[in-house]
Amino acid sequence: MKKTALFCLVVLALSFSSSCVKNSAEYKRLQAEKDSLALVNAKTTTDMEDILSILNEVEDNFRSIKSAENYLSVQSNSPGELAPTAKERIHSDMQLITETLEKNRQKIAELEGKLKNSSIKSEQLQQALNKYRQELDQKTMALVAMNEELDRKNQQISELSANISNLSKDVQDLRIQSNAQQQTINKQQKEINTVYYCFGTSNELKNQKILVNNDQLGANFNRDYFIPIYDFNKLTVVQLWAKKGKLVTKHPDGSYEFVKDANNQVELHILDPVNFWSLSKYLVVLVNV
């Protein structure tokens, strides 16, 4: 009977403990973070699928015009008058190439918009986008050159001339737009990678409104007092020039350590930069604590 009673008490204690944990604020916060990460991951997967679908469509479009492009190249370089059937084929092929290049121009613009608005930062995707943009320029210029050659042979397709001219202008406009978008992307990437740090004694940090109650970052602190680092991966060691140091800002355990140098002064070593800066873009170290 005693063993049975003891067993029942243990079960009740465990049940009560589990219920307390699940109802705690920390448990609910962690569960909310888990749900948020799941949503972000699902959106990223959907964005990637859309981007890859557009890339495949652009690649298929370029592949579909190669045969027509080769025929036009041969005809534009052939001597003499073109046969009526050849003229019809040229008309058809130039129409196909013009329309397909226009489709790819729109797809590339759509792809740039998706990359800009998504959380995906991929150098490989950016390189693929640059390659397709360059290929679009090259094929458009090639089409213009072939049309000029046919015109010299009095075989210009008058109804397509305006379309080709507009397409050439569209390519130039797209290049200008792409350069502006790339500058925006570069600026955003720089902002993402930029972090700030400072260190000082309690009085120094309080004078700059950085330290409140010895353990909090103030709301209206002097941002000019911080040292900017434009690529957080390059900041691995912070020399503190002091005997002791203590972090004021929050950074994950295990992502850093304090190490004594040869002069018995403390240094902050950042072991995992991505994890270290995940909670805050600002680092404040209180020295001589």
Image (tube, rainbow, N blue to C red):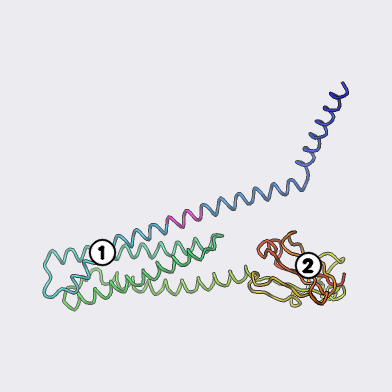
Q: Depth check: give the residue in front, 108 or 162.
A: 108
Which mark, residue 108? none
Highlighted range, magenta: 46-53
Point out residue 144 in the picture as x, y percentages from the top left corner.
28, 74
Going by the numbered disc 1, the residue's amino acid type is Gln
| Rendered view: 103 above or below 156 | above
Answer with mark 2 or mark 1, whichever residue precedes in sequence.
1
Point out residue 32 in the picture as x, y percentages from the top left corner.
69, 48
Q: Residue at x 26, y 76 (%)?
A: 145
Using residue 56 as the reference point, say whether residue 264 is left or right of it: right
Which mark, residue 258? 2
Tag nearer the camera, 2 or 1: 2
Q: Residue at x 82, y 77 (%)?
A: 263
Q: Depth check: give the residue in front, 63 or 112.
A: 63
Point out residue 21 in the picture as x, y percentages from the top left corner.
78, 42
Q: Depth check: give the residue in front, 14 or 54.
A: 14
| Rendered view: 57 above or below 288 | above
Q: Quadrant of the C terminus?
A: bottom right
